[in-house]
């Protein structure tokens, strides 16, 4: 999740915009994963297993994992966006195409 966010941040090159895009994209990926698992797999059994192990409702754990994944993706994108600004230095212009990336 962090690596995907870093790659997205390198291409976006703007700090907080890259965080928002990284957060949304990784959260959406986790949501799609849970939807696909609900279609082809026994998600109710997974939720009941989580409930017995952790004492949490499986639905809460699903939302928690989506939010946590989004925060990790957003943090990675923020790191990537600021790292590319740091590397490019004075040549940084987010509107201009660079030869670096």
Image: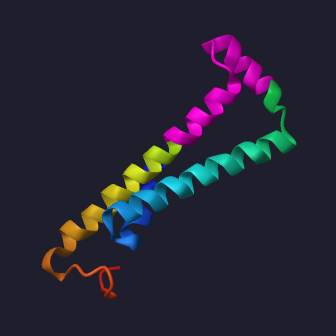
Say whether residue 16 is left or right of residue 68. left
Q: Dividing the picture into quarters, in which one does residue 54 lie?
A: top right
Q: Residue at x 84, y 37 (%)?
A: 41
Percent x, y for residue 46?
75, 26
Q: Residue at x 54, y 56 (%)?
A: 24
Res 4 seen here: no
Res 34 seen here: yes
Percent x, y for residue 89?
15, 74
In the rendered image, residue 55 lying in the magenta stretch gets the answer yes
Say whether residue 27 is left or right of residue 9. right
In the rendered image, residue 29 lying in the magenta stretch gets the answer no
In the rendered view, would you say 54 is above or below 58? above
Part of the protein shown in magenta: 45-68
In the rendered view, would you say 18 is above or below 75? below
Percent x, y for residue 92?
22, 79
Dominant secondary structure of the residues highlighted in magenta in the image: helix
Q: Residue at x 56, y 33 (%)?
A: 64
Q: Residue at x 23, y 69 (%)?
A: 85
Say whether residue 25 is left or right of residue 35. left
Say whether residue 28 is left or right of residue 43. left
Nearest to the observer: residue 98 or residue 66 = 66
Q: How many marks?
A: 0
Check the picture and name the quadrant holding the C terminus. bottom left
Q: How is the image coloured?
A: rainbow
Nearest to the observer: residue 59 or residue 80 = 59
């Amino acid at each position: 999740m962090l690596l995907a966010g870093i790659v997205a941040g390198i291409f976006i090159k703007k700090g907080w915009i890259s965080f928002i895009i990284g957060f949304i994209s990784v959260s959406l990926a986790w949501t799609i994963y849970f939807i696909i698992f609900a279609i082809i797999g026994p998600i109710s059994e997974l939720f009941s297993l989580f409930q017995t192990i952790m004492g949490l409702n499986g639905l809460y754990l699903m939302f928690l994992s989506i939010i946590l994944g989004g925060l990790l993706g957003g943090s990675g994108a923020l790191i990537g966006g600021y790292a590319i600004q740091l590397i490019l230095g004075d040549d940084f212009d987010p509107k201009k195409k660079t030869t670096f990336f």
